[in-house]
């Protein structure tokens, strides 16, 4: 692979990335000190309730109330308009 353009390896834009609580918890229970609880947490019907609750929240609460508006607003930005020009 050839990367073309100016070398930007020395540029620091000051972005900070935090760990997702979901990823942190997953690592703790699947590979960390609480891994002995993994079968109880991830291989029972109660875990399916967590998945169902997450889908309910994202699909029926967060997206209609918050997400849809954010997506519509982002489409009005310069980058959003550029994105819309790409073929799908």
Image: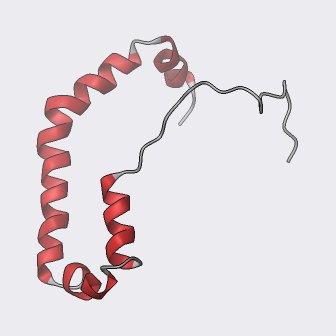
- Which x, y percent locates residue 42? 25, 79
Q: Which residue lies at the image location 86% right of the left edge and 31% below the top edge? A: 4
- Which x, y percent locates residue 64? 16, 34
Q: Which residue lies at the image location 77% right of the left edge and 28% below the top edge? A: 8
- Which x, y percent locates residue 11? 72, 26
Which quadrant of the view contains residue 75? top left
Position of residue 43 relative to residue 84, above or below, is below
Q: Viewed as shown, does residue 46 lie left or right of 9?
A: left
Q: Viewed as shown, does residue 27 lie left or right of 46?
A: right
Position of residue 87 relative to residue 57, above or below, is above
Q: Which residue lies at the image location 29% right of the left edge and 88% below the top edge? A: 36
Q: How many numbered discs?
A: 0
Which quadrant of the view contains residue 60? top left
Name the foreground residue: 77 vs 46. 46
Q: Which residue lies at the image location 49% right of the left edge and 23% below the top edge? A: 84
Position of residue 30 relative to residue 22, above or below, is below
- Which x, y percent locates residue 83? 52, 24
Which quadrant of the view contains residue 28? bottom left
Position of residue 71 relative to residue 34, above or below, is above
State the scheme by which the image is colored: secondary structure
């Amino acid at each position: 692979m050839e990367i073309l353009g100016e070398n930007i390896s020395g540029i620091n834009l000051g972005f900070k990335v935090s760990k997702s609580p979901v990823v942190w918890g997953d690592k703790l229970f699947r590979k960390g000190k609480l891994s002995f609880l993994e079968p109880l947490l991830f291989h029972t019907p109660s875990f399916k309730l967590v998945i169902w609750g997450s889908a309910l929240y994202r699909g029926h609460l967060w997206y209609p109330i918050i997400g849809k508006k954010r997506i519509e607003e982002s489409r009005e930005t310069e980058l959003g308009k550029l994105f819309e020009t790409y073929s799908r």
